[in-house]
């Protein structure tokens, strides 16, 4: 059994990973709308992370993070320097997310981005972890970085399997494992792929927003009609 990492007082500045294991294999979607997040989504990110089971929190942060520690991590997210993106369901719940942390522009050595992500327990087995990783690869590549880096607990076999499948070099050191993936140079095709994918994801999100508003209005109308009906029945009885 690997020794759990010590519990720091604050959430880590760099992301880790927790994809968890799916209880059963579900049909893989042909396309997953992955939308970029902004500071306005902090509450949704916080909600997603604090709803992770204890085991998933351990895999995600490298220790059994408390709600308070997760809150500090979410507050520390730098949306201007880094990229945070996620997958929304029809109710606009954030069911999968990733944090792509970029190095400082003036940092010496190779320019590597660090990837970390998580998927809600009820959304496992749909390929979201792999799609988030592919999305991160594309964005880091188009940003001019030459490699993608993952630091994970060795027992996080799901995330390490995703990294290996992408061609990453995996180096294990006891209870922790590092994975390094070399990225090709960006091309016109990769830039267009990102532009089209981001645009389609934004359209998908707006459509879900409109559907959510319509559902809320219809629900309110139904409640009003129900109230009027009950009042009419009571008046007739009187």
Image (tube, grey):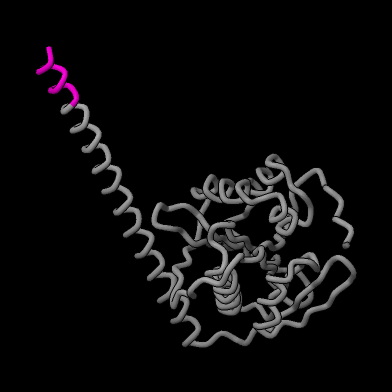
Magenta run includes residue 233? yes
Say which residue appears at 80% left-offset and 68% top-offset: 154
Name the dominant secondary structure of the magenta segment: helix
Magenta part of the chain: 230-238
Figure quadrant of residue 99: bottom right
Q: Position of residue 117 (x, y in %)?
A: 63, 63
Q: Is residue 83 left or right of residue 114?
A: left
The total of numbered circles placed on residues is 0
Say which residue appears at 70% left-offset and 60% top-offset: 15
Query: Does any portion of residue 101 appear in the rendered image?
Result: no
Say which residue appears at 50% left-offset and 50% top-offset: 41
Q: Quarter of the image containing the N terminus? A: bottom right
Say which residue appears at 85% left-offset and 74% top-offset: 172
Q: Position of residue 178 (x, y in %)?
A: 79, 72
Figure quadrant of residue 78: bottom right
Magenta run includes residue 231? yes
Q: Quarter of the image containing the C terminus? A: top left
- Which residue occupies the foreground of this view, 193 or 92? 92
- In the rendered view, would you say 110 is above or below 188? above
Figure quadrant of residue 218: top left
- Which residue occupies the foreground of this view, 120 or 235? 235
Q: Residue at the top extreme?
A: 238
- In the rendered view, would you say 63 is above or below 197? above
- In the rendered view, would you say 193 is above or below 86? below
């Amino acid at each position: 059994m690997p020794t759990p990492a010590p519990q720091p007082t604050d959430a880590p500045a760099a992301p880790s990973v927790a994809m968890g294991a799916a209880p059963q294999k579900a049909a893989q979607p042909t396309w997953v709308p992955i939308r970029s997040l902004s500071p306005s989504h902090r509450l949704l990110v916080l909600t997603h992370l604090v709803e992770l089971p204890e085991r998933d929190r351990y895999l995600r942060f490298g220790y059994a993070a408390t709600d308070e520690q997760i809150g500090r991590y979410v507050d520390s997210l730098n949306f201007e320097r880094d990229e945070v993106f996620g997958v929304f369901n029809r109710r606009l719940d954030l069911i999968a997310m990733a944090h792509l942390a970029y190095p400082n522009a003036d940092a010496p050595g190779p320019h590597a981005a660090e990837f970390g992500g998580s998927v809600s327990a009820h959304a496992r087995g749909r390929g979201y972890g792999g799609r988030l990783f592919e999305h991160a690869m594309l964005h880091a590549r188009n940003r001019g970085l030459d490699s993608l880096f993952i630091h994970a607990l060795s027992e996080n076999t799901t995330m390490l399997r995703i990294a290996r499948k992408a061609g990453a070099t995996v180096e294990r050191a006891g209870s922790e494992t590092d994975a390094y993936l070399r990225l090709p140079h960006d091309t016109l095709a990769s830039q267009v792929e990102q532009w089209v994918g981001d645009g389609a994801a934004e359209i998908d999100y707006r459509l879900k927003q409109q559907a959510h508003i319509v559902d809320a209005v219809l629900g309110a109308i139904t409640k009003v009609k129900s109230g009027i009906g009950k009042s009419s029945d009571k008046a007739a009885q009187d």
